[in-house]
DNA sequence: GTTAAATCTAAGCAACTGCTTAGTTATAGT
DNA sequence: ACTATAACTAAGCAGTTGCTTAGATTTAAC
């Protein structure tokens, strides 16, 4: 009875996600999304309700794509060594040619004001905590590790990972790998 | 022959700087600056040319205010211990009551797009490099330190410091101090 | 007191923001 | 072929952005 959609929602979200990743949430306008996704504003709002909806779908996709790395970490049984591999894998994952885009989530956490967009903020915090939990889980695998220190070590690793998201825009690849190497020295 | 200015430029920049610090560059509008600085838009443009001008003056003031800490580091002769103290001092400096605002410069680096505002970006990079140079200088004071490793250690420290700027918005004070403690374990 | 210049206020500019609405076009069941 | 319905296009909404301009006000030298 009705006309068919001339675009695939999964395909256009992929394009939107990459734009958000490069650009950040606030400074990506609906007009830019229109061009990048190749569909009209009306269609964007029909499919995803609003800009926030497009972003939340983008995070879901980001989450699915990064799963290939987090799964490796989740299935690893080699303690801190698995986390170290996650750091290197993440660096690879966040690269687009010679440019490091950082983590979509971390970039946005840093951009969004705490109480300006609670829905997005909640989604972002949920993501970060899930990574930290994987760190804790893997740290516990090392038998000789001091159990009281594990939480502090997880925070230390999160700090380094957050830092890497900024550093990757300033330092070159060799330096970034040196930073990772040094980060794991005390663990 | 002419009317007197009804405001003190240094005073209004102090207010502008604190607003930028809390809010970021992009999401601070000229209307907000107007209210916070207590002067009309015309006066802002007359005194500082444009929004960018207000921000550049704000960075100068920020630089002057953080000098009390960087001077301590610059005059210190105790190597890595001096840098550790800088980290703790910076945490104190960036606090406003119970809230940590991070570093004005790091916050803005993360917000500004690389090629959208080269003038501001250049000013920010200059600031970051000057901090890193102080780290290198202090690391060299430790006689037993491996000279080849010093540059890598400086990058590692910058990464931790950049991370702290984000972490301070997520973690509580006790955790932040634990992160600093762990950061200096391998040094 | 007059005059000239700097400083003030407030209105207004074009370009942009996220989002909506009116009207046209394509599609599938009858 | 006709018709109901969803998907399309493009124009337009009110609100905000950084910045400017027109005109009133204050000041100090003469």
Image (cartoon, coloured by chain):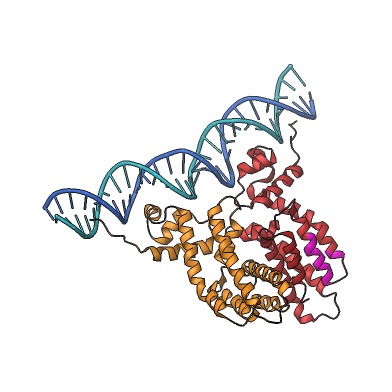
Chain colours: A orange, B red, C cyan, D blue
Which residue is at a point 81% across and 61% down the rendered structure image? B70
**Number of marks:** 0
Q: Is residue C15 above or below residue A15?
A: above
Q: Is residue B181 above or below residue B20?
A: below
Determine if residue B45 is in view: no
Determine if residue B6 is in view: yes
Which residue is at a point 75% across and 62% down the rendered structure image? B174
Q: Nearer the viewer, residue A131 or A162?
A: A131
The reply to whether the magenta stretch includes residue A66 is no
The reply to whether the magenta stretch includes residue B77 is yes
Quadrant hosting residue B128: bottom right
Locate residue B113 relative to residue A30 in the image: left or right.
right
Q: Nearer the viewer, residue B112 or A26?
A: A26
Residues shaded magenta: B73-89
Q: Is residue B180 above or below residue B104?
A: below
Q: Quadrant of the C terminus of chain A?
A: bottom right
Q: Nearer the viewer, residue C24 or A133?
A: A133
Magenta stretch secondary structure, dominant: helix
Whole-percent x, y for residue A180 in the image: 66, 76
Whole-percent x, y for residue C15 in the image: 49, 48
Which residue is at a point 85% across and 76% down the rendered structure image? B142
Q: Is residue B9 above or below residue B96?
A: above
Whole-percent x, y for residue B1 in the image: 75, 30
Quadrant hosting residue B118: bottom right
Whole-percent x, y for residue A144 in the image: 71, 82
Locate residue B171 relative to residue B114 in the image: left or right.
right
Q: Quadrant of the N terminus of chain A?
A: bottom left
């Amino acid at each position: 009875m009705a006309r068919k959609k001339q675009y695939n929602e999964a395909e256009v979200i992929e394009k939107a996600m990459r734009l958000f990743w490069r650009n950040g949430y606030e400074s990506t306008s609906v007009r830019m999304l229109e061009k990048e996704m190749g569909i009209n504003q009306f269609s964007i709002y029909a499919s995803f309700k609003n800009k926030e909806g497009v972003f939340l779908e983008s995070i879901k996709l980001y989450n699915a794509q990064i799963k290939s790395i987090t799964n490796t970490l989740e299935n690893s049984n080699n303690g801190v060594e698995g986390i170290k591999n996650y750091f290197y894998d993440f660096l690879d994952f966040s690269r687009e040619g010679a440019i490091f885009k950082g983590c979509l989530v971390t970039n946005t956490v840093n951009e969004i004001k705490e109480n300006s967009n609670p829905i997005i903020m909640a989604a972002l915090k949920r993501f970060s905590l899930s990574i930290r939990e994987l760190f804790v889980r893997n740290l516990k695998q090392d038998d000789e590790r001091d159990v009281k220190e594990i939480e502090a070590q997880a925070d230390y690793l999160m700090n380094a990972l957050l830092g890497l998201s900024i550093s990757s825009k300033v330092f070159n690849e060799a330096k970034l790998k040196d930073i990772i190497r040094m980060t794991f020295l005390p663990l």
